[in-house]
Amino acid sequence: MFIAMNRFKVIKGEEAAFEQVWRSRESYLNELAGFIEFSLLKGPEREDHTLYASHTVWASKENFTAWTNSEQFRKSHARAGQGKPLSIGHPEFEGFEAVLVDDNRSVPSAAAE
């Protein structure tokens, strides 16, 4: 499993606009082999920005690399940087290969009982 994360320093007051960009985007992630899950995470507020992270789970690093070289990747990032700036600087990428995974996704939730 491979986790791909980009950290964004979103300018104070632009959080709603930043989130809307992500909500309205066409990601094409579901078209790629090995895509498991995407989340947009909102973190702590700082003096001049709010920290966000995009968090994408892939079956393997090779699947992630294939995504970055795909036409779907180019299409999903075509609008990046258009409009007024919403973040400070460029996103900071971090990639992680899982060495241990422990989940309970197959366990029924209390609401389902």
Image (cartoon, grey):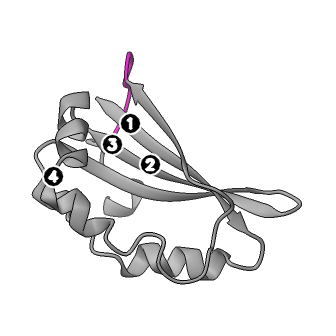
Q: Earlier in the sequence, mark 3 or mark 1?
A: 1
Question: Where residue 70 is drawn, which disc sits there?
Answer: 4
Whether residue 36 is situated above or below residue 23 in the rendered picture? above
Q: Within 10 Å of the Cα at label 1, are there few (<14), some (14-19), or many (20+) other Cα atoms?
A: many
**Residue ID at (65%, 56%):** 89
Do callouts 4 and 3 mark residues in contact (Cβ within 8 Å)? no
Q: Is residue 99 magenta?
A: yes
Mark 3 highlights which residue? 57
**Residue ID at (50%, 48%):** 6
Question: Where residue 3 is drawn, which disc sits there?
Answer: 1
Q: Amino acid at mark 2?
A: His
Classify residue 15 as left or right of residue 64: right
Whether residue 88 is situated above or below residue 34 in the rendered picture? below
Nearer to us of marks 4 and 3 is: 4
The x, y position of residue 36, in whole percent, is: 24, 47
Q: Earlier in the sequence, mark 1 or mark 2?
A: 1
Q: CA distance from mark 1 to mark 2?
A: 7 Å
Determine the residue located farthest toward the top in the rendered image.
99
Residue 44 showing in the rendered view: yes
- Viewer-nearest residue: 72 or 37: 72
Figure quadrant of the C terminus: bottom left
Do callouts 2 and 3 mark residues in contact (Cβ within 8 Å)? yes
The x, y position of residue 32, in whole percent, is: 13, 52
Residue 27 showing in the rendered view: no
Figure quadrant of the N terminus: top left
Q: Which residues are magenta?
A: 98-104
Question: Where residue 55 is drawn, which disc sits there?
Answer: 2
Do callouts 1 and 2 mark residues in contact (Cβ within 8 Å)? yes
Q: CA distance from mark 2 to mark 3?
A: 7 Å
